[in-house]
């Protein structure tokens, strides 16, 4: 038990150090997830010490029973969420992600239930299920790590001493700012006036070019919205040439670099989008920044967060693909 507690404490200490140095890394969340795993092993060792073999057997049986039920509940919940999302947001491809993942989880649970029969009569199918289980384990570890990174990056919120607020766009309808984007702008306005009561207000950089179905660039629609909320024109800068988050941040960095050498900035976007935007901000070379996340409707959050997770994995797709291939080969080798 002491061994696992030492490992858990070491991982937590390393996580704290990494978070202080640079919170915009998935590695931080991975270290934190490892600390949770070691803490769980320490608890199992403690139960084994106090209750002997019977105590640890009861705990292991409970875990074996609860994990499948938790996966099953997650699969059903994702399918229900996907149904609600399509009813409220329309049957578009990007709205199918939570439902698709729920169906995949149910299929995976069915494959696990059939594993004893497959191992006996269809060894090739059993090998496929084994490989799938390894991949699910790896992706689950990454998802928990990403979730931990997202939570800790948003804490604490930025102090009211920022030079810039970078507000990321998400599309407009004609010239109208939709509710999702309005939530981001309202968050920026709230912070702007809170800082203005104490010190020099920040400069707001609104990001987004003109996309399909948009009469004006997103940045211009956002600037109009900010002026209606009382933000002076001289405190608004437009970045109206970008088509995605990476370009948003790259062009915003140029604006900030042209204004001053050393600056403090905060990203303003939806809460589900904040951590991936932070990862991209580090990639484009923004030295340090914090984040302000606006709230998102609960039914929209699971699907959107899954999209962001996939986007974050795609940033290092070769590395993750190599790990998946190694795990698949290890699983096949373990089966003989």
Image: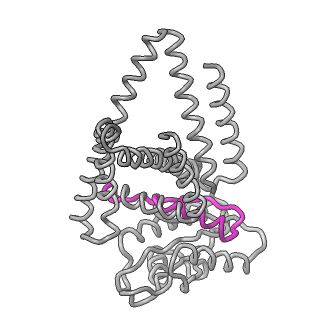
The residue under the point 26% across, 47% down is 76
Pick whichever, 133 or 249, lies toward us: 133
Quadrant containing the N terminus in the rendered view = top right
Question: In the figure, is residue 93 to the left or right of 187?
Answer: left
Pick whichever, 153 or 303, lies toward us: 303
Colour logic: one colour
The residue under the point 50% across, 81% down is 243
Question: In the figure, is residue 305 to the left or right of 113?
Answer: right
Magenta residue span: 271-300
Residue 274: image x %, image y %? 52, 60
How many numbered dots are placed on residues in this image? 0
> Which of the 4 image quarters holds residue 258?
bottom right
Residue 176: image x %, image y %? 36, 81
Residue 39: image x %, image y %? 56, 28
- Establish if 138 lies above or below 229: above
Residue 85 lies within the magenta run? no
> Which of the 4 image quarters holds residue 299?
bottom left
């Amino acid at each position: 038990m002491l061994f696992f507690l030492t490992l858990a404490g070491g991982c937590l200490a390393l996580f704290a150090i990494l978070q202080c140095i640079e919170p915009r890394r998935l590695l931080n969340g991975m270290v934190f997830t490892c600390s949770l795993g070691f803490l769980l092993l320490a608890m199992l060792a403690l139960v084994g010490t106090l209750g002997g073999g019977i105590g640890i057997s009861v705990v292991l049986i409970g875990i074996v029973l609860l994990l499948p039920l938790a996966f099953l509940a997650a699969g059903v919940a994702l399918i229900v969420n996907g149904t609600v999302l399509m009813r409220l947001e329309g049957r578009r491809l990007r709205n199918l992600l939570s439902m698709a993942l729920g169906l995949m989880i149910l299929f995976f649970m069915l494959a696990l239930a059939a594993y004893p029969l497959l191992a006996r009569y269809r060894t090739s199918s059993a090998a496929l299920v084994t490989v799938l289980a390894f991949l699910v384990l790896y992706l689950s570890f990454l998802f928990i790590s990403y979730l931990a990174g997202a939570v800790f990056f948003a804490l604490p919120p930025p102090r009211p001493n920022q030079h810039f607020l970078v507000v990321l766009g998400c599309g407009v309808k004609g010239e109208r700012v939709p509710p999702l984007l309005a939530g981001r702008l309202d968050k920026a306005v709230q912070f702007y006036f809170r800082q203005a009561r104490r010190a020099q207000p920040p400069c707001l950089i609104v990001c987004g070019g003109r996309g399909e179905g948009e009469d004006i660039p997103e940045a211009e629609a956002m600037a109009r919205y900010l002026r209606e909320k009382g933000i002076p024109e001289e405190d608004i800068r437009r970045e109206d040439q970008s088509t995605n988050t990476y370009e948003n941040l790259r062009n915003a960095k140029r604006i900030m670099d042209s204004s001053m050498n050393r600056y403090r900035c905060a990203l303003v976007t939806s809460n589900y989008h904040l951590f991936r935007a932070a990862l991209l901000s580090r990639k484009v070379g923004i030295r340090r920044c914090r984040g302000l996340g606006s709230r998102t409707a609960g039914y929209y959050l699971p699907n959107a967060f899954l999209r962001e997770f996939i986007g974050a994995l795609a940033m290092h797709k070769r590395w993750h693909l190599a790990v998946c291939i190694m795990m698949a080969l290890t699983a096949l080798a373990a089966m003989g």
